[in-house]
């Protein structure tokens, strides 16, 4: 069983179900409003835990009911939350999600306490980081603490996974040099590298550009089309499982969490792990919400 530590965001999602995503200046009505736990970090941790990993979470909540509720959500999946601390300055993160009839979404995120994680928080979690097999993070918390956590990881042979979302055109070069595996989607890949994804050749050029910046391996996810991988042993493209999509929220997070639960530290089973993660994502998109839609190991194995 892999031990996976996730440094990341905790949000409460409010989801507005709409016929179509609004155009600039357009006012539309929502058919249904719902709420669910979310945040890329929390989603990835729960995906890892439900896929069988021993999972630890490093994060921050506000001193509010949303934060208390999210601790309960994480603990119900057996996640160690002893390094989820409370901010006295900022409230728990929130996200507003617009979800259309085709399952596509637009998301507005209020970071809140997610941006209040400190170097001291990382120092206190040093043992959990250094005793893990994998350390996963995203960009819904600060790059500064990501670098510090990755430094601890790399000194102790812990494999680092970076999900560069929300995407930014400039990533701290030190963070990339500390990254073993980066997993952007096609839009994020283009923002980071400046190379538009149009075919497998453009995927390869994009991956090589990231490799040249110090990253050891790359997976570019392409939603319903599948994913391209460029690893130290092999490269190639894996098709996604074809399903009827209801809601794409947390599909990418499920992929990353599920992958981290199965991957060998030497990447020797990278292809099999991507197939497993793709199956997990295919189940996520068939249900509404983020955390409620993330599948269990038993459900993934039935595909």
Image (cartoon, rainbow, N blue to C red):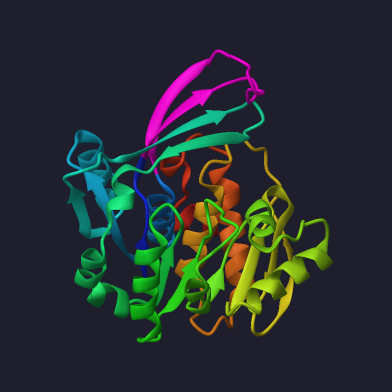
92 up-or-down from 261: above or below: above
* Quarter assignment of residue 143: bottom left
Q: Count up the numbered dots.
A: 0
Can residue 53 be seen? Answer: no
* Quarter assignment of residue 63: top left
Magenta part of the chain? 12-38
Which one is in front, 200 or 277? Answer: 200
- The quadrant in which the C terminus is found is bottom right
* Quarter assignment of residue 218: bottom right
Q: Is residue 18 magenta?
A: yes
Which one is in front, 299 or 6? Answer: 6
Image coordinates of residue 265 in percent, x first then y, are 48, 81
Q: What residue is rendered at 33% in x and 51% in y?
A: 115
Q: What residue is rendered at 58% in x and 80% in y?
A: 214
Q: What residue is rendered at 57% in x and 62% in y?
A: 170
- The quadrant in which the N terminus is found is bottom left
Q: Is residue 84 magenta?
A: no
Image coordinates of residue 172 in percent, x first then y, are 50, 68
Image coordinates of residue 151 in percent, x first then y, are 37, 79
Q: What residue is rendered at 22% in x and 64% in y?
A: 121
Q: Is residue 230 left or right of residue 301?
A: right
Which one is in front, 87 or 290? Answer: 87
Image coordinates of residue 137 in percent, x first then y, are 43, 63
Q: Is residue 113 left or right of residue 138?
A: left
Can residue 161 be seen? Answer: yes
81 up-or-down from 148: above or below: above
124 up-or-down from 85: above or below: below
């Amino acid at each position: 069983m892999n031990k996976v530590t996730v440094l990341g965001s905790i949000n409460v999602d409010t989801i507005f179900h709409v016929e179509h995503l609004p155009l600039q200046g357009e006012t539309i009505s929502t058919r249904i409003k719902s709420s669910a736990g979310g945040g890329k970090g929390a989603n990835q941790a729960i995906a890892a835990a439900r896929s069988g990993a021993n999972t630890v979470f490093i994060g921050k909540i506000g001193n509010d009911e949303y934060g208390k509720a999210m601790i309960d959500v994480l603990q119900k999946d057996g996640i160690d939350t002893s390094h989820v601390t409370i901010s006295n300055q900022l409230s728990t993160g929130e996200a507003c999600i617009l979800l259309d009839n085709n399952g596509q979404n637009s998301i507005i995120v209020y970071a809140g306490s997610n941006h209040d994680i400190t170097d001291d928080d990382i120092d206190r979690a040093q043992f959990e980081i250094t005793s893990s097999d994998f350390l996963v993070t995203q960009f819904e918390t600060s790059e500064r603490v990501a670098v510090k956590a990755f430094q601890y990881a790399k000194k102790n042979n812990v494999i680092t996974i970076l999900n560069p979302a929300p995407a930014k055109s400039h990533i701290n070069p030190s963070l990339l040099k500390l990254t073993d595996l980066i997993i952007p989607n096609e839009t994020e890949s283009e923002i980071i590298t400046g190379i538009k994804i149009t075919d497998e050749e453009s995927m390869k050029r994009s991956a090589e550009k990231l490799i040249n910046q110090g990253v050891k391996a790359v997976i570019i996810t392409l939603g319903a089309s599948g994913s391209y991988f460029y690893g130290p042993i092999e490269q190639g493209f894996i098709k996604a499982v074809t399903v009827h999509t209801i809601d794409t929220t947390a599909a990418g997070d499920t992929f990353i969490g599920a992958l981290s639960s199965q991957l060998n530290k030497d990447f020797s089973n990278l292809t099999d792990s991507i197939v497993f993660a793709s199956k997990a994502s295919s189940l996520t998109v068939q249900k509404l919400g983020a955390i409620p839609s993330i599948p269990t190991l038993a459900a993934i194995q039935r595909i």
